[in-house]
Image: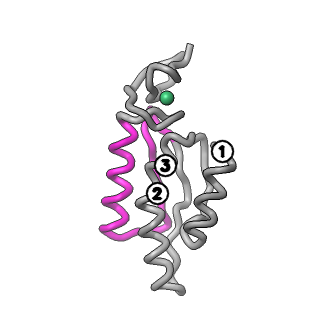
C-alpha cells in the first residue's frame, strides 16, 4: 500500500483513520472511501463512542473489513466494498477476476496477473 493513499486518508478522515492494514493493496483501499466518510461523520457526532476499523485484509481473494462495532449504514457500505472487491483488481482497482496462484486466491486485472 502506498504512503500517498495513507496520507490522503489520514488527512481527510482523521477520525476514521485508526486501523491496522494487513496485506491489502491500493486498488481495494479506494473501495473504502465511502465507509471512511461515514465513519468520520459518525465519530464527529459521537465523541465518546468512537467507531473504528480494526482490520482490513484480503481473504480468499476478496476484501474483508472488521470493525469494533458498526451500524446498518456502515455495514451496508462495507458489504458493498467487499462485494466490489470480487470484481476489482487488488493492485489497481480496475476490473478484475478471481484467480489462483500457487494455491492462493487473489483478484486481479490482466496486467497484474501473478506468474
Ligand atoms: Zn490491476
- Indicate yes or no: mark 3 CB to ligand 1 under 8 Å: no
Q: Position of residue 32 (x, y in %)?
A: 46, 54
- Indicate yes or no: mark 1 CB to ligand 1 under 8 Å: no
Element at label 3: helix
Query: Horizontal placement of 16 versus 34: left or right?
Result: right
Dot 1 and dot 2 residues touching (CB under 8 Å):
no
Q: Quadrant of residue 20?
A: bottom right
Q: Which residues are magenta?
A: 58-86
Mark 2 lies on residue: 33
Mark 1 lies on residue: 2
Q: CA distance from mark 3 to mark 2?
A: 6 Å
Query: Horizontal placement of 31 versus 9: left or right?
Result: left
Q: Between residues 41 and 54, which one lies in front from this camera angle?
A: 41
Element at label 2: helix
Q: CA distance from mark 1 to mark 3?
A: 11 Å
Element at label 1: loop
Q: Position of residue 112 (x, y in %)?
A: 52, 23
Q: CA distance from mark 1 to mark 2?
A: 15 Å
Q: Residue at x 35, y 34 (%)?
A: 87
Q: Quadrant of residue 9?
A: bottom right
Mark 3 lies on residue: 30
Q: Is residue 87 magenta?
A: no
Q: Residue at x 55, y 68 (%)?
A: 13
Q: Is residue 76 magenta?
A: yes
Q: Residue at x 32, y 51 (%)?
A: 80
Q: Residue at x 60, y 45 (%)?
A: 22
Q: Position of residue 1 (x, y in %)?
A: 63, 43
**Pointer 1: residues within 10 angstroms few (<14), some, or many (20+)?**
few
Q: Is residue 14 above or below residue 106?
A: below
Going from N to C along the chain, the mark reached first, 1 or 3, is 1
Going from N to C along the chain, the mark reached first, 1 or 2, is 1
Amino acid at each position: 500500500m502506498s504512503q500517498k493513499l495513507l496520507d490522503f486518508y489520514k488527512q481527510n478522515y482523521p477520525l476514521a483513520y485508526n486501523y491496522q492494514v494487513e496485506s491489502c493493496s491500493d486498488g481495494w483501499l479506494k473501495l473504502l472511501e465511502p465507509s471512511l466518510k461515514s465513519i468520520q461523520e459518525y465519530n464527529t457526532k459521537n465523541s465518546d463512542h468512537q467507531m473504528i476499523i480494526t482490520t482490513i485484509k484480503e481473504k480468499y481473494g476478496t476484501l474483508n473489513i472488521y470493525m469494533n462495532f458498526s451500524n446498518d449504514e456502515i455495514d451496508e457500505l462495507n458489504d458493498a466494498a467487499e462485494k466490489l472487491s470480487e470484481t476489482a483488481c487488488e493492485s489497481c482497482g480496475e476490473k478484475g477476476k478471481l484467480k489462483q496462484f500457487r494455491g492462493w486466491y487473489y483478484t486481479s486485472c490482466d496486467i497484474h496477473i501473478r506468474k
